[in-house]
């Protein structure tokens, strides 16, 4: 089939993945269009837009995940679609760089043991709290209230993953003031339990500082931004080469995923090599 005919098909593919929490989910495939959009959000430093996009494209299919599980999925997708290495410039150098494997970070995540949920009882309210599910927090209050998973009052339970932000705000206003102190206490206990995950060890030989992540902050989102903002020029260059060599339009390319495109491009390279080898056999003077 010509590439231009691919737009007549609607292929929904996902793959299984076991998360740090132990949950097994099926993660939807992301297209070149999605990868390109994520790169642009990161290049323009639009973290809020980045979170909204991944919530629609990825996490809308697998809701109610903690920030740790979401971070793991985004890291895993980055390895699959953009490669397992990330390049850092060394301090006090404009040319020297160091490559670090992202698979090492994935292994650190797999060793994490996320803390269990806790129930806080205040007056007639029973509030279930846990690790945040959001990736980005616009304010400290946003962070605190993202710890709430559900609120039960007089036997009626409200799941916070199934209501709107406006509905959440109305419930916040009804909670007793002393609940805020309990919420702050829980936040502090989470900090002590999770600590700061060291994703890159300090390397004095290469003058590289340690990089750690606090999951109760915007650090995970900013770190993911750093990962997806790399290689946008290489991505655009490959898109140009693919369309001009293999065929189709830029829209056709964006509907595929990068790995399928690389396989097809390798087919093209092998075909050209075979044709050149055949010409050499037929004409020894051909180089």
Image (cartoon, helix red, strand yellow):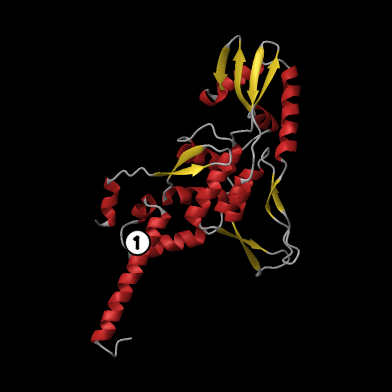
Going 30% across and 87% down the picture, which residue do you hit?
Answer: 286
Is residue 40 something that shows in the picture?
A: no
Going 40% across and 52% down the picture, which residue do you hit?
Answer: 257
Residue count near mark 1 (Cα–Cα under 10 Å), binned few <14, some 14–19, many ≥20: some
The picture places residue 112, in percent across and down from the top left corner, at 64, 43
Residue underneath mark 1: 264
Is residue 263 something that shows in the picture?
A: yes
**Picture quadrant of residue 278:** bottom left
The picture places residue 66, in percent across and down from the top left corner, at 58, 35
**Picture quadrant of residue 159:** top right
Image quarter of the N terminus: bottom left
Position of 210 relative to 57 (above/below): below
**Left-right relation of 10 to 119:** left
**Left-right relation of 255 to 170:** left
**Picture quadrant of residue 186:** top right
Position of 97 relative to 35 (above/below): below
**Left-right relation of 283 to 112:** left
- Say which element carries label 1: helix
The picture places residue 73, in percent across and down from the top left corner, at 53, 44
Image quarter of the C terminus: bottom left
């Amino acid at each position: 089939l010509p590439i231009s005919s691919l737009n007549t098909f609607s292929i929904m593919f996902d793959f299984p993945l076991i998360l740090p929490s132990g949950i097994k989910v099926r993660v939807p495939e992301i297209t070149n269009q999605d990868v390109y959009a994520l790169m642009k959000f990161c290049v323009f430093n639009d973290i809020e837009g980045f979170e909204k996009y991944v919530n629609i494209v990825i996490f809308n299919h697998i809701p109610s995940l903690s920030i740790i599980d979401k971070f793991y999925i985004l890291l895993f997708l980055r390895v699959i679609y953009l490669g397992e290495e990330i390049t850092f410039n060394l301090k006090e150098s404009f040319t020297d760089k160091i490559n670090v494997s992202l698979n090492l970070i994935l292994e650190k995540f797999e060793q994490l043991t996320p803390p269990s949920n806790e129930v806080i009882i205040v007056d007639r309210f029973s509030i279930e709290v846990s690790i945040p599910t959001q990736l980005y927090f616009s304010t400290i209050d946003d962070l605190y209230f993202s710890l709430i998973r559900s609120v039960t009052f007089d036997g009626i339970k409200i799941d916070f993953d199934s209501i709107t932000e406006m509905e959440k705000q109305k419930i916040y206003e009804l909670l007793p003031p002393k609940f805020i102190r309990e919420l702050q206490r829980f936040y502090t206990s989470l900090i002590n339990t999770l600590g700061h995950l060291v994703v890159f060890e300090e390397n004095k030989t290469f003058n590289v500082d340690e990089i750690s992540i606090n999951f109760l902050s915007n650090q995970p989102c900013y770190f993911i931004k750093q990962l997806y903002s790399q290689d946008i020029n290489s991505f655009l260059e490959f898109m140009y080469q693919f369309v001009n060599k293999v065929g189709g339009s830029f829209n056709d390319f964006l509907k595929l995923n990068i790995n399928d495109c690389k396989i097809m491009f390798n087919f093209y390279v092998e075909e050209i090599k075979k044709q050149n080898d055949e010409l050499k056999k037929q004409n020894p003077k051909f180089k």
